[in-house]
Image (cartoon, rainbow, N blue to C red):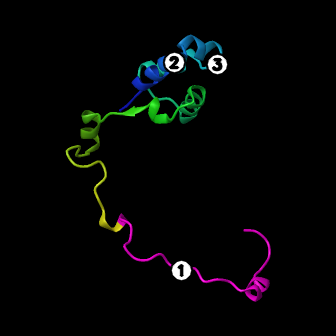
Amino acid sequence: MIVYDRLWKTMKAKDISQYRLIKYYKISAGQIGRLKENACVSTHTLDVLCTILNCAVEDIVEFRMDSTLASELGVDVSQDAVPSDPSLSSPKTEPQKIPRVSEDQEEDAPSGSF
């Protein structure tokens, strides 16, 4: 579940009121209502709010596990959210060396951009 409790704290810290969001920044009263209800808002709205408040998205949005939704989706919340996969860990080998290109090879290369 996405909640916007941090938004109200950030707004208070930055001295930005709901009235100012609506009147000065043209955020709709409907958007404010959806934020108050922790309802769905677009990523564009989050982008605009982060810009207005000069903050990161995690300063206004928080994820809280909804066990009811997780159960409906068949997700086991007793485990890590993402199971660890050893194949995803960084390799312990040396980075691959990229061969240098001589001036002759550069001249033979096709010109133009991708």
Tell me where residue 27 appears, x and y as whole percent.
60, 20
Q: Circle 1 is placed at which residue position?
A: 97
Does residue 54 appear to the left or right of 104 in the view shown? left
Instruction: Report the Cα–Cα distance between label 2 and label 3.
Output: 11 Å
Report the magenta residues as a range.
88-114
Q: Do callouts 1 and 2 mark residues in contact (Cβ within 8 Å)? A: no
For badge 3, the amino acid type reads Lys
Q: Which residue is mark 2?
A: 32
How far apart in space, not on screen, are marks 3 and 1 (Cα)? Answer: 53 Å
Amino acid type for the residue under numbered disc 1:
Lys
Whichever of labels 2 and 3 marks the residue nearer the N terminus, that label is: 3
Could you tell me which quadrant the N terminus lies in? top left
CB-based contact (under 8 Å), mark 2 and mark 3: no
Residue 85: image quadrant is: bottom left
Q: Which mark is residue 26?
A: 3
Q: Is residue 20 left or right of residue 92?
A: right
Distance Cα–Cα, label 1 vs label 2:
53 Å
Image x and y of residue 112, in percent: 79, 72
Q: Residues within 10 Å of mark 3 (few under 14, many from 20)?
A: few
The C terminus - image quarter? bottom right
- Image depth: mark 3 or mark 1 in front: 1
